[in-house]
Amino acid sequence: MGGVTYLYYRSRDDYVSKEVKASTWFIGYMIVFGALSYMGSLGMGYIQYPWDYLIALVVSIVFFIVSVRQGFETKEIRQVKEGNLPIE
């Protein structure tokens, strides 16, 4: 069900499509960290301490860079940059 919803919004060319595209890194992040947790020292023990933590650190930095590059400027961010915030 989630995959169908993802493909539907990905095929559309609007703001929601941008949001879906900008959040695809998170799916990979969850899969990779699930596998790391399973293989690490607190899981099956295939990757021993401290190597599992060092790998997690490097992978986190990579996913951070990917997430920042996939981000986009929203209307709200533009308002903050310009200083034109609405008074609530």
Image (cartoon, grey):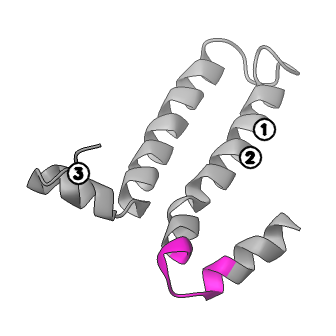
The residue furthest front is: 88
Q: Is residue 1 shown left or right of residue 81?
A: right
Label 1 CA crowd tier, 10 Å (few <14, some 14–19, many 20+): few
Q: Mark 1 points at which residue?
A: 35
Mark toward the start of the polypeptide (3 vs 1): 1
Label 2 CA crowd tier, 10 Å (few <14, some 14–19, many 20+): few
Q: Give the range drawn in magenta.
A: 9-17
Residue in front for this viewpoint, 59 or 71:
71
Q: What is the three-letter code of the residue carrying label 3?
A: Pro
Q: What is the three-letter code of the residue carrying label 2?
A: Ile
Q: Mark 2 points at which residue?
A: 31
Q: Is residue 61 shown left or right of residue 88?
A: right
Task: Please give the name of the residue rendered at 73% of the width and 32% of the height, measured from the top-left corner.
Answer: 36
Mark toward the start of the polypeptide (2 vs 3): 2
Q: Name the residue under label 3.
A: 86
Q: What is the three-letter code of the residue carrying label 1?
A: Ala
